[in-house]
Image (spheres, coloured by chain):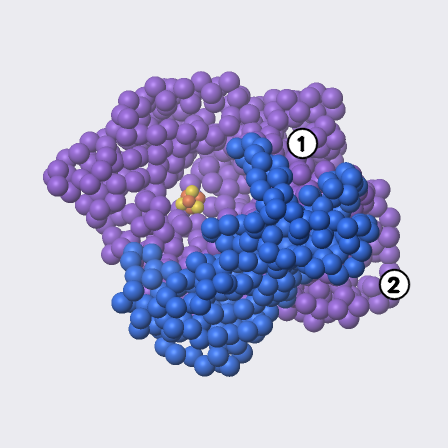
Chain colours: A purple, B blue
Amino acid sequence: MYPDKILLQSQKPGRYVGNEINMARKNPADVATRFAFAFPDVYEVGMSHNGLQILYAAFNARQDVYCERAFAPWPDMEALMRENALPLKSLETYSPLADFDFVGFTLQYEMTFTNILNMLDLANIPIKAADRGEEFPIICGGGPCAANPEPLADFFDFFFIGEAEEAFGQVFDLYAAHKAKGGAKTAFLQELAALPGIYVPAFYDVKYNTDGTISSFAPNNPHAPPRVQKVFVKDMDAAFYPDAPLVPLIETIHDRAVIELFRGCIRGCRFCQAGYIYRPHRQKSVDTLVSQAQQLIESTGHEEISLLSLASNDYPHLEQLVDTLCDHFDDGKVSISLPSLRIDATNSNVLHKVQSVRKSGLTFAPEGGSQRMRDVIKKDITRDDITQGARLAFEGGWDRLKLYFMVGLPTEDEGDLAAIGRLCEELVEIYYRLPKERRKRPVSISVSTSCFVPKPFTPFQWFGQHTAEEFMHKQKHVKQSIRSKQINYKYHDAETSVIEGALARGDRRAAAAIEQAWRLGARFDGWSEHFDADIWRRAFDTVGLSVDFYAHRPRPYDEVLPWDFIDMRINKEYLVKESMKAMDVIQ
Amino acid sequence: MSLKQSYYRYRITFAKAGMARFIGHLDLQSLFQKAIKRAKLPVAYSEGFNPHQLLSFAAPLPLGMAGYAEILEVFMAHEVTADRLFAALDAQLPQGIAIVGIMEVPSVGKSAAAIIRMATYSITFSQALDLHTIIPNVLSSQSIEVEIKSKKGVKTADIRPDIHDICIETPRSLWAVLACGSERNLKPEILAQHILKVSGIAPEDCDISYERLAIGQDVPPL
Ligand code: SF4
């Protein structure tokens, strides 16, 4: 443990001590492989992430592996650690990260990239793969941002492409055999590179055209395949799921047990990376879910169970599942939450049984304000769906609605923005059409707009993202379209979204900008109180790169994209066709 | 009260030390709720829209401080033997928290928080002090005016009435019985800083560590 004196000077010492319920306890000397699961955000965020729970338990289910955890220290703690020359340590055994065989980062969000470098540095591990000799751990990563790992290529030894659950077994087998032989890191990485779902960036060379675009991307090592295929879990019912997840001892973002209804999404909204990269759609049976839910409640003591998926409306047995769960936990002391439920006529029964809805109100994510806009992005929700859903909700006694939209979508014009306000005003009117005695208090509609960030493996991957000025202009437009005092408008920071956009579609050279931003002090860039746009602008300038090139520049369909070498099992021609169809909608 | 009369009330004494010192008060509550749930104990719930377990602590322990005889009260819907309660609950507590005693108490009557009057703290200084001169002086004073910093500013207060007793253990450690509870409360830090001040030592030159050895009541529970 860090010394008391240090811990007590930090804002929340509980972040740095571990000791949670269901924490894995092993003797590091007894295992072949020590793996540090590194989450590049603060403890409370990382501990609320279901992927961490799954992989932590799956890794530790192997006797020959001990998986421990590390999170990004909050800036107050970082300062204390640097002042006192304390290295970043794991929460389980308080071992310095440099002592592990692997340090594995989860890549959930581009704006955590500087935290990755910071964590390596705090662990006294050189940030660049090329500078790490045999004595240093192997650094790996996986998660949604590994869909385009190129901006991180210089820092990592390998990436998991697709779902790491499906690939880690072979990695650990190989490593144990390799360690027993006493083989060198490069030899291990060569064998690794041949596995499906593994990408070793050092084994590929990138060449560029004079205009900065990629001219070729090819393996420089005979073991590395020209294209890396993503791997994914095939049978969700048979897939490993933790039966005793970690229960934090301090408050985290979510304090609840989680079951996963399905992976992937049947919708294919054109802006949505998750909808594409998590294909195919795979679901669990009601039986599996009910027994997992019961097991989790018993092993954690949580009083809430959350039904996780990209869109719970699309789970075909939702009502049956919710009913069965309600029966199982019939003492009423376990509540059910459905974070991604959208109200419609088919599920108003379910709604009343769901606690989270009672507490926080109902949400809609039409994403686009006008029908035209929603057709462009293929968001399968109509004005009638929303107004009827709202009417049902109001009649059911709810008077709080949340609506999510995006600004900066392809082909968007002022009419589409004005439609956001109009739609919300309409909902207010619907509420006031209720008989007076049924309106307990004024309705409250919160509207929030995010800034559209084009992502790899979507039909909009070629689209030039808006500049921060354009975003702000559009936000102002939305604001002007709202008149009712019952509507509360919030919007995301435009500059953050632009940097996110530049990193999301960056190539290998973007690593220099990330490193420079980190050196200039960028940390926790996803947190508005820490994000500093000026640092990032200076970072890009200093290393001679342009945000415009990565974020705002529209790409021709035939350009070699940095992530083209990944076989995401989505046909590029299909994406081109979808992209053209989207643009056709304007006619 | 009629509701609680049909319940069974247990006063659980527990220790919280080591790594568990960094669990704050609210988090401790949620930790015990989950432990009780995992232990499958027949805990009683409040009525209403958001029922919660009937569970309360006698006196919050400051973050970072170890406590060796802290008190928690919990109501059960059915009677449970103290043995079973001990075995089931202790097994569910994280390292650093342990049950050290259980007593069934009448289900009506003041809450544990309402009867706590004093607490005993062990205070250890990183250097030896002339405690054999200072402490008798403290105890024989009629009043001790100190400056207390709070969010609202600095005020002077007489802390002497809140010092019940002090015993010297070694030249750098002592234990003190101080007022604790909702009516009167004296933080051990305030006494320790006063001792440093009369010793002529600057606060930054001496580290001080604290433990809460026990909390106590001065009236019977009924
Ligand atoms: S936005 Fe939602 S519904 Fe659409 S593809 Fe993505 S996850 Fe599915």
SS assignment at label 1: loop
Reply above or below: A287 against A43. below
On the image, numbered disc 2 is attached to which residue? A182
**Residue under the image location 61 percent in, 44 percent down:** B143
Chain letter behind tag 1? A
On the rendering, which quadrant does ligand 1 occupy? top left
Rounded to the nearest angstrom, the CA distance separating label 1 from label 2 is 39 Å
Q: Earlier in the sequence, mark 1 or mark 2?
A: 2
**Residue under the image location 20 percent in, 36 percent down:** A431
- Number of residues whose C-alpha sits closer than 10 Å to that of mark 2, classed few (under 14), some (14–19) or many (20 or more): few
Q: Nearer the viewer, mark 1 or mark 2?
A: 1
In which image quadrant can residue A387 be found?
top left
**Residue under the image location 34 percent in, 34 percent down:** A446
On the image, the x and y values in percent for residue A284 come to 44, 63
Q: What amino acid type is highlighted by mark number 2? A: Gly
**Residue under the image location 73 percent in, 40 percent down:** B197
On-image quarter of the C terminus of chain A: top left
SS assignment at label 2: loop
Q: Nearer the viewer, residue A77 or A109?
A: A77
Q: What amino acid type is highlighted by mark number 1? A: Ala
Q: Nearer the viewer, residue A584 or A95?
A: A95
Q: For residue A464, which numbered disc appears in the image?
A: none
Q: For residue A522, which numbered disc appears in the image?
A: 1
On the image, the x and y values in percent for residue B82 come to 48, 79
Q: Are marks 1 and 2 in contact (CB under 8 Å)?
A: no
Reply above or below: A321 against A134. below
